[in-house]
Image (cartoon, helix red, strand yellow):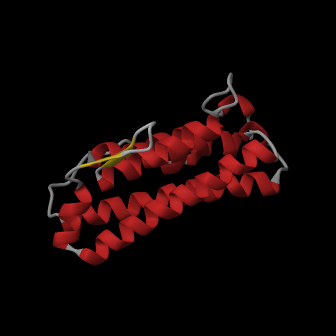
Amino acid sequence: MLTGMDSLSYGESAGERMTLGLLLHDPEEEHDCFSDNTHNSHYYDVIGIQNVYLGRYKRIDVTIMQGPSPADFVKITDAVTDGRMRSSLAAAVEAFAAIVTRAELVEAYDQMIGEGNEVGNKFVQTGIDALLNQTKKTRRFITALRLKPMQFEGSDNLDDPSKLAQ
């Protein structure tokens, strides 16, 4: 679960799916380039990460399924770290909810990442920053749980942006 949370936040979403499109300002680099549904894909990825941490899932009929979660263990071990993780997850959900709202009311995601679109770019960058902050918190709670170091998916776009020029 923890490897998946971190890898989806950092390597996959922030790195490969979002940063590349924003750096290149290329609408074909948006995740769902054929359906114009990228905003929802990103939003529900963030919701999924939060669901894993909290051990809950909202069904289509709006009932909530809940069970043991990483949050339960982190809260027992280090309540401050748990609080910070919950806050970073909530901030990510808020940032991506803003992207969804903008995509549905103002401009599509591929327009947000367009060159010269400072406002749209800022929405996307805020989402990326929220994912990066969330990743830092995930790695802190792994330490709080006294787990062995884990291998996470990296991202050339985040780890070494100079490779994009090649």
Residue 115 image-quadrant placement: top right
* Image height of 144 relative to 101, above or below: below
Q: Is residue 18 left or right of residue 36?
A: left
**Left or right of 6, for residue 106:** right
In x, y percent, where is residue 152? Answer: 32, 45
Taking the image as shown, residue 37 lies to the left or right of residue 147, namely right
Residue that protrudes farthest toward the bottom in the picture: 80
The picture places residue 39, in percent across and down from the top left corner, at 64, 41
Which corner quadrant holds the N terminus? top left
Q: Looking at the picture, does residue 3 appear above or below residue 147?
A: above
What count of labels does the image hold? 0
Q: Residue reaching furthest top? A: 34
Residue pictured at 15% horizontal, 58% vertical: 147
Viewer-closest of 96 and 6 = 96
Q: To which quarter of the image does residue 31 belong? A: top right
The one nearer the camera, 41 or 56, is 56
Residue under the point 68% across and 22% down: 34
Name which residue lies at 52% across and 47% down: 14
Residue 151 is situated, as x and y percent measured from the top left of the image, at: 27, 45
Please identify the quarter of the rendering in which residue 43 is found.
Answer: top right
Query: How far across and down, in percent of the image, does residue 150 sit?
Result: 23, 49
Q: Does residue 156 appear in the picture of this structure?
A: no
The answer to whether residue 86 of the structure is visible from this angle is yes
Question: For the point 70% across and 30% down, which residue is it?
Answer: 36
